[in-house]
Image: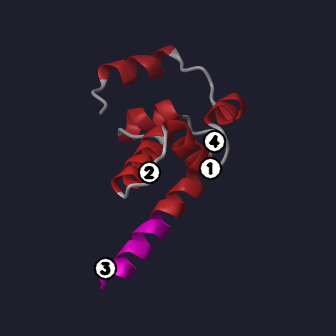
Amino acid sequence: MDDQTRIELEAAAFRALRDHLAAHPEVQNIDLMNLAGFCRNCLSRWYQEAAEARGIPMDKEQARTAFYGMPYEDWKAQHQQEAGAAQQAAFDAAKHD
C-alpha cells in the first residue's frame, strides 16, 4: 500500500471514530477514559498536536470545536453528565497521560 492510500485510510478511520462517538453522546468522556484511557478531549488534543506539527496554529478550543462539531461548552451543556462517585474514583485511581 502506498503512503497516500494509508494516510487516506487512517483519516477515514479517524472520521468514522469521531462520527461514532458523536452519534453516542450518552457515552460519557469519563467512561471512555476509565475503559480505554482516552476520550473525545484526547482525540481533539491529538488533532491539535497534528495541526501544530504541520505549522497550522490551532488552540485547544478550536481543536475541540473541530472534533465535537460545536463549541465544547455547548456539547458539555447538551450531553455531559456529572461524574458519579464510582466513575470519579476509577478515574482518580488510573494514571492518565
N-term-proximal mark, 3 vs 2 = 3
Amino acid type for the residue under numbered disc 3? Asp
Q: Position of residue 44 (x, y in %)?
A: 48, 45
Magenta span main SS: helix
Neighbourhood count class around disc 3 (C-alpha, 10 Å): few under 14, some 14–19, many 20 upward: few
Q: Which residue is mark 2?
A: 47
Q: Position of residue 82 (x, y in %)?
A: 60, 20
Left-right relation of 19 to 50: right
Q: Position of residue 22 (x, y in %)?
A: 62, 49
Q: Residue at x 49, y 69 (%)?
A: 12
Q: Quadrant of the C terminus?
A: top left
* Residue closest to the eye, 47 or 79: 47
Amino acid type for the residue under numbered disc 2? Tyr
Span of residues in magenta: 1-13
Are discs 4 and 1 less than 8 Å apart at CB? yes
Q: Which residue is mark 1?
A: 22
Neighbourhood count class around disc 4 (C-alpha, 10 Å): few under 14, some 14–19, many 20 upward: some
Q: CA distance from mark 3 to mark 4?
A: 33 Å
The residue mark sitting in front, 1 or 3, is 3
Image vertical order of residue 32 relative to residue 19, above or below: above
Q: CA distance from mark 4 to mark 1?
A: 6 Å
- The disc at residue 25 is 4
Q: CA distance from mark 1 to mark 2?
A: 16 Å
Q: Residue at x 31, y 30 (%)?
A: 96
Q: CA distance from mark 3 to mark 2?
A: 19 Å
Amino acid type for the residue under numbered disc 1? Ala
Q: Residue at x 53, y 62 (%)?
A: 15
Choose top left, top right, bottom left or bottom right for residue 51.
bottom left
Are discs 3 and 4 less than 8 Å apart at CB? no
Q: Which residue is mark 3?
A: 3
